[in-house]
Image (cartoon, helix red, strand yellow):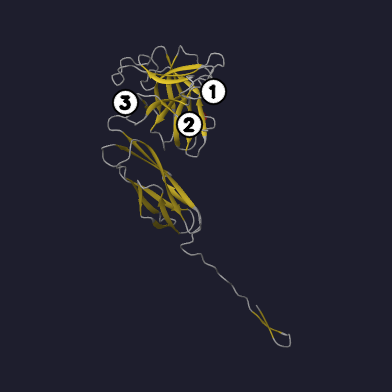
């Protein structure tokens, strides 16, 4: 600032310094939540799952935040707080599955700061039946079971079912009828027709490996049975095809991955899916590829496993609505 007299001569010059300080509630940096997702499991008739904690961190200065949940079965406390370096906030998440039916449910915790940024935490609730879910040989300790489906029940060109005496383990007491999953597609089936099985109770999991036993006498090619995985970011991934480089054929004697005589064990790495899987799972299906245009396609499958956990067998076949 310059001060001058009325005659225009310079009298004095002053230098002023303006300092602007940020407020504690504005905050800088990026708000993060640890862990980035939560999964609760509940068996009907049992105790409600224990609550879980989220740590709320900020990489910059201190900031306030507000948190909200998206579904009534999910509750959080407290719903507001402050987080800064060396002083993280915390949120306790709890679920109330009372009155809910077996299945997979998804919700979110949205954590917002005054500057308008939002951090989202995905929450999965997996409810299984106390009677074991999908019928005889049904859900396993992981609560998962495979439910056959076809996308078109009217044309008679698609089939999917658990069939007695076609399984790989005839002396398994949990499946006395030794059922195998048969999926078939005739050469006259619609090009977009689907036959396969949906794996129940997988929402929210992080996929590490998948696999199944394939009856060795069935033609095995790039269009054979594959895993179709949809992740929570709405991306569709294909994983499998037993001539693909993503496939590992296992002949070890380890019980979890060995294949009985007459069967081939196929194991697949999610990192080699198309495209690679790097988000949480929304759904998993086994689907039959297009097969030969002249003869159609067929596959007989048993001992499905997800992340090393055996998948149970549903007792019914269902139709699935077409995506279009």
- Label 3 neighbour load within 10 Å: few <14, some 14-19, many 20+: some
Q: CA distance from mark 3 to mark 1?
A: 31 Å
Q: Earlier in the sequence, mark 1 or mark 2?
A: 1
Q: Is residue 36 above or below residue 217?
A: below
Q: Is residue 115 above or below residue 194?
A: below
Rendering coords of residue 305 (x, y %): 40, 26
Q: Is residue 292 above or below residue 113?
A: above
| Along the viewing direction, whichever of 324 and 277 lies nearer the viewer | 324
| Along the viewing direction, whichever of 193 and 309 lies nearer the viewer | 193
Rendering coords of residue 247 (x, y %): 50, 22
Q: Say if mark 3 contacts mark 2, CB within 8 Å.
A: no
| Residue at mark 2 | 229
- Residue drawn at (39%, 57%) of the image: 80
Q: Secondary structure at mark 1?
A: loop
Q: Earlier in the sequence, mark 3 or mark 2?
A: 3
- Residue drawn at (40%, 33%) of the image: 202
Q: Is residue 166 above or below residue 304?
A: above
Q: Earlier in the sequence, mark 3 or mark 1?
A: 3
| Residue at mark 1 | 190
Rendering coords of residue 309 (x, y %): 37, 28
């Amino acid at each position: 600032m310059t001060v001058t007299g009325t005659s225009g001569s310079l009298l004095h010059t002053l230098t002023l310094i303006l300092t602007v300080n940020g407020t504690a509630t504005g905050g800088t940096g990026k708000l993060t939540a640890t862990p980035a997702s939560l999964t609760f499991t509940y068996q009907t008739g049992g105790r409600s799952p224990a609550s879980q904690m989220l740590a709320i961190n900020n990489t910059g200065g201190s900031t306030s935040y507000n948190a909200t949940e998206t579904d009534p079965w999910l509750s959080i406390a407290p719903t507001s707080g402050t987080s800064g370096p060396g002083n993280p906030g915390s949120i306790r998440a709890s679920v109330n599955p009372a009155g809910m039916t077996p299945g997979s449910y998804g919700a979110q915790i949205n954590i917002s700061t005054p500057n308008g940024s939002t951090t989202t935490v995905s929450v999965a609730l997996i409810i299984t039946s106390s009677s074991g879910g999908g019928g005889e040989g049904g859900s396993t300790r992981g609560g998962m079971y495979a439910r056959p489906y076809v996308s078109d029940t009217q044309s008679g060109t698609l089939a999917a079912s658990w069939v007695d005496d076609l399984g790989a383990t005839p002396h398994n007491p949990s499946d006395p009828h030794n059922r195998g999953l048969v999926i078939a597609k005739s050469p006259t089936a619609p090009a977009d027709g689907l036959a396969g099985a949906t794996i129940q109770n997988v929402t929210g999991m992080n996929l590490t490996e998948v696999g199944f036993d394939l009856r060795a006498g069935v033609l095995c090619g790039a269009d054979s049975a594959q895993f179709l995985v949809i992740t929570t970011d709405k991306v569709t991934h294909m994983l499998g095809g037993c001539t693909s480089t993503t496939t590992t054929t296992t002949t070890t004697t380890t019980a979890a991955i060995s294949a009985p005589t007459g069967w081939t064990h196929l194991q697949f790495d999610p990192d080699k899916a198309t495209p690679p899987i790097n988000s949480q799972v929304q759904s998993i299906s086994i689907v039959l590829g297009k097969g030969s245009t002249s003869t159609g396609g067929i596959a007989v499958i048993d001992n499905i496993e997800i992340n090393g956990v055996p998948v149970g067998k549903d007792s019914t076949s269902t139709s699935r609505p077409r995506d279009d």
